[in-house]
Amino acid sequence: MEIDDHNDEIKACERCRLHENRTQAVPNQGSADADVMIVGKMVGYKDDKVGLPYQGEAGNVLDYALERADKTRKDVFLTNLTRCYPPESRDPRTDELDRCAPYFERELELVDPDVIVALGKLVAERILGRDVKIGDEHGTHHTYNTLTYRGEVVVTYNVGAATYEPGLRDTIAEDIVHAFDLV
Ligand code: SF4
């Protein structure tokens, strides 16, 4: 399957209740040839309106981090564990994450990145399959090993957290720079 077919499938998806609230599903953005995949937990309010991930202030935090790494959005693959905006920006529920998970697994096969950047606790715990304390583990990397994929996972804060704690902008940027150093 090609990435465009994959994205078309997501745009038509009604596997979980989140499709009821969306303006549109937001599959991903960036290069399917990227070495670094950046993964968040969910689509934001503006993402839902625009149809692209990481819009608004959280997107500015991400773009700042990429700039610090001397990269742009074209140099990475940006995705989320869920692709439809949750009501009132609540966290996605476990069953919603489970329903959307096959899309993430397929993206790992299609993109085959060397490094995954996990944005925030929920994402890091879903990917690593264990409890994660972001304050202790941000900037560290771990080997992710499944039947279909093996690569490094760099843990950092959710970019949304830096919109109300500005000091995290540089922390996230440094962690993302570290991710590129692993390639
Ligand atoms: S969040 Fe994922 S599983 Fe749920 S409807 Fe959207 S694309 Fe489908």
Image: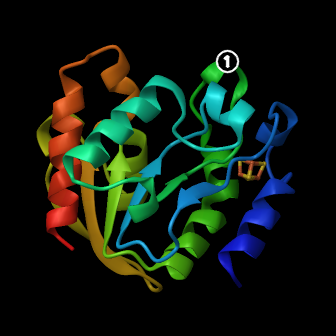
Residue 68, visible in the rendered structure: yes
Q: Residue at x 21, y 60 (%)?
A: 179
> Which percent across, then down, holds residue 165?
27, 16
**What is the quadrant of the N terminus in the image?**
bottom right
Q: Residues within 10 Å of mark 1 (few under 14, many from 20)?
A: few
35, above or below 24, in the image = below
Which residue lies under the disc numbered 1?
A: 88
Q: Residue at x 39, y 75 (%)?
A: 113
Residue type beneath disc 1: Glu
152, above or below 30, in the image = below
1, above or below 167, in the image = below
> Which percent across, then down, holds residue 79?
53, 54
**In the picture provided, is 83 more to the left or to the right than 104?**
right
**What is the quadrant of the C terminus in the image?**
bottom left
At numbered mark 1, what does the secondary structure look like: helix, strand or loop?
Answer: helix
Image label count:
1
| Nearest to the observer: residue 75 or residue 26 | 75
- Snapshot colouring: rainbow
The picture quadrant where one finds residue 76 is bottom left
Q: Residue at x 77, y 38 (%)?
A: 18
38, above or below 45, in the image = below
> Which percent across, then down, holds residue 2?
69, 81
> Which percent across, then down, holds residue 32?
52, 73
Q: Residue at x 72, y 72 (%)?
A: 4
**In the picture provided, is 156 more to the left or to the right than 9?**
left
| Nearest to the observer: residue 51 or residue 15 | 51
Residue 158, visible in the rendered structure: no
